[in-house]
Image: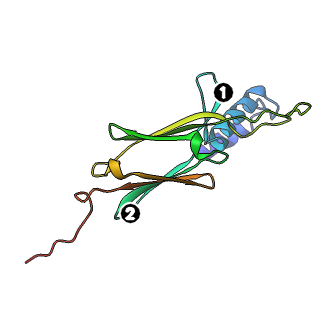
Amino acid sequence: MFENALTRVTKSPFISARDPFHGLFDRVFDNVWNDSDFVAGESGRRTWLPAVDIKETDEAFVATADLPGLKKDDIDVSIEDNVLTVSGERKFEDAAEGTTFRRVERAYGSFRRSFTLPRGVDSVKVEARFEDGVLMLQIPKSEVAKSRKITVS
């Protein structure tokens, strides 16, 4: 049933490849799927959101954020009310006089990522290391939260 309806729609003489609505529809979905690391900011401009991976080990949670082109002084890490926040800014490099940008695809500007920490972490002992554009946060579990084997007597 759906296959026949789809065939009728795609073969319709009223839908043209040059139809402007069709092109707009395709561009909207291309932007949604291809620009997953960008979101619209308040001004409607694209804003940068760095990718973050979080994994769990027996001893800690480890968060890794890709922050290419930044220096450690460009990054702020804080914990308040059990919320870990990573923020910073990647500044746009102005072109030298006589240089004209023909295409700018890399995103610039401020970013802020916040994550609620799970119960049982020791937020006092969080360690941050930044190397080669990658921020790694080691968030240790408290002794109470660590799993342990209990011997049955």
Q: Residue 97 bears which disc, if any?
A: none
In percent of width and height, residue 109 lies at: 64, 33
Q: Relative to 58, is 32 on the left or the right?
A: right
In percent of width and height, residue 130 lies at: 55, 52
Q: Quadrant location of the N terminus?
A: top right
Residue where numbered disc 2 is placed? 57
Image-quadrant location for residue 140: bottom left
In percent of width and height, residue 93 lies at: 75, 36
**Residue type at the position of mark 2:** Thr
Q: Residue at x 34, y 63 (%)?
A: 59
Q: Secondary structure at mark 1?
A: loop
Residue 90 vs residue 18, the one in the foreground: 90
Q: Residue 45 bears which disc, if any?
A: 1
Q: Secondary structure at mark 2?
A: loop
Lower sequence index among marks 1 and 2? 1
Q: CA distance from mark 1 to mark 2?
A: 38 Å
Q: Residue at x 78, y 33 (%)?
A: 94
